[in-house]
């Protein structure tokens, strides 16, 4: 008699990579235009980040571009975290961010703007030079990865540049950058945090949480419980166990700790099993 090999479980198709390098020059141009339009009083307006005013966010954007160029492009590391353990990496990143903001927020707005233009040009050139399917120097930790490809790290970088610029725009009453071309890839990238966030959420096989972001930049994402854990997939025919609908105006704030869980839930529509819906509102797609 021959042994019968058990059939492998049918898993949903993997989502395609998110290619975003070509968007950086456009986003950088919008940032420079925005900063040049600010009035002196705008630079001290409070953003949704509790510890940061507009000048702090601008300083952070400059600092992180300089650091990325130094480390990834130039291979220069002045220091490193004590280990690659999450707590050590988080402590290290938070300290570096705080130090960078402390230094560059001391500069005048005209000086900050004068530094942005050449740094942004170098940064965009570097991003566009990277081969998307080669290993990235840094993994996307909030997605639970210990190794990532460049396309994912680049998309993660896009979410940083987009949401910090949106913080400035929101704080100063400027028109946002919620266009399908720029915002939808940000949402696509943020959603990749969901399987890692849900990794310890129990559910029956084929349980499905459908996330809907309303608005012309939004879309639908299905989080499916398979035999090997939670996976993010394109729309499926599986009956949903829970459904979460949020307006695009707050979706980015959920992933970046820019809104409380209570406020986000009050503006959302939740149906089905709330125990499966609620972890969505605690999903974080930033480091720090």
Image: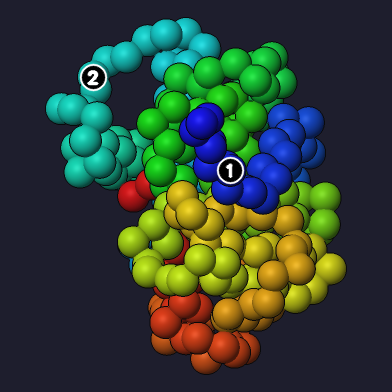
How many marks do you count on the picture? 2
Across and down, in percent, residue 8 comes to 57, 42
Residue highlighted by disc 2: 79
Q: Which residue lies furthest to the left in this view?
A: 82
For mark 2, give the secondary structure: loop
- Residue at the image position 25 percent from the left and 41 percent from the top: 86
Q: Residues within 10 Å of mark 2 (few under 14, many from 20)?
A: few
178 lies left or right of 41 = right
Q: Residues within 10 Å of mark 1 (few under 14, many from 20)?
A: few
Query: Marks 2 and 1: CB-CB under 8 Å?
Result: no
Q: Distance between the residues labelled 2 and 1?
A: 49 Å
Q: Which of marks 2 and 1 is nearer the N terminus?
A: 1
For mark 1, give the secondary structure: loop
Across and down, in percent, residue 20 comes to 72, 36
Across and down, in percent, residue 1 comes to 51, 31
When the figure is inspected, residue 108 is found, relative to residue 146, above or below; the finding is below
Whether residue 99 is visible, yes or no, is: no
82 lies left or right of 193 = left
Q: Which of 254 and 61 is in front in this view?
A: 254
44 lies left or right of 122 = left
- Residue at the image position 71 percent from the left and 21 percent from the top: 128
- Residue at the image position 53 percent from the left and 37 percent from the top: 4
90 lies left or right of 235 = left
When the figure is inspected, residue 257 is found, relative to residue 128, above or below; the finding is below
- Residue at the image position 44 percent from the left and 27 percent from the top: 147
Q: Residue furthest front?
A: 1
Across and down, in percent, residue 42 comes to 56, 63
Residue highlighted by disc 1: 7
When the figure is inspected, residue 232 is found, relative to residue 201, above or below; the finding is above
């Amino acid at each position: 008699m021959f042994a019968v090999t058990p059939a492998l479980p049918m898993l949903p198709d993997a989502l395609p990579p998110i290619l975003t390098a070509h968007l950086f020059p456009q986003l950088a141009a919008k940032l420079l235009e925005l900063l040049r339009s600010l009035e002196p009083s705008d630079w001290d307006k409070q953003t949704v980040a509790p510890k940061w005013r507009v000048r702090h966010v601008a300083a952070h954007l400059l600092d992180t571009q300089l650091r990325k160029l130094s480390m990834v492009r130039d291979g220069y590391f002045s220091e490193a975290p004590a280990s690659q353990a999450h707590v050590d990496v988080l402590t290290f990143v938070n300290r570096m961010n705080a130090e960078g903001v402390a230094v560059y927020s001391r500069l005048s707005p005209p000086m900050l703007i004068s530094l942005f233009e050449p740094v942004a040009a170098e940064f965009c050139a570097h991003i566009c030079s990277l081969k998307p399917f080669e290993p990235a120097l840094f993994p996307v930790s909030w997605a639970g990865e210990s190794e990532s490809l460049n396309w994912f790290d680049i998309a993660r970088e896009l979410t940083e540049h987009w949401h910090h610029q949106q913080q400035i725009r929101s704080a100063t009453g400027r028109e946002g950058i919620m266009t399908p071309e720029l915002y939808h890839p940000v949402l696509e990238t943020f959603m990749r945090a969901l399987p890692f966030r849900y990794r310890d959420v129990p559910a029956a096989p084929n349980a499905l949480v459908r996330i809907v972001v309303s608005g012309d930049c939004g879309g639908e994402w299905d989080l499916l419980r398979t035999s090997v854990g939670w996976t993010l997939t394109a729309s499926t025919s599986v009956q949903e166990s829970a459904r979460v609908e949020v307006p695009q105006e707050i979706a980015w704030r959920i992933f970046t700790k820019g809104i409380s869980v209570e406020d986000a839930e009050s503006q959302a529509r939740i149906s089905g099993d709330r125990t499966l819906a609620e972890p969505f509102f605690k999903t974080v797609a930033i480091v720090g």
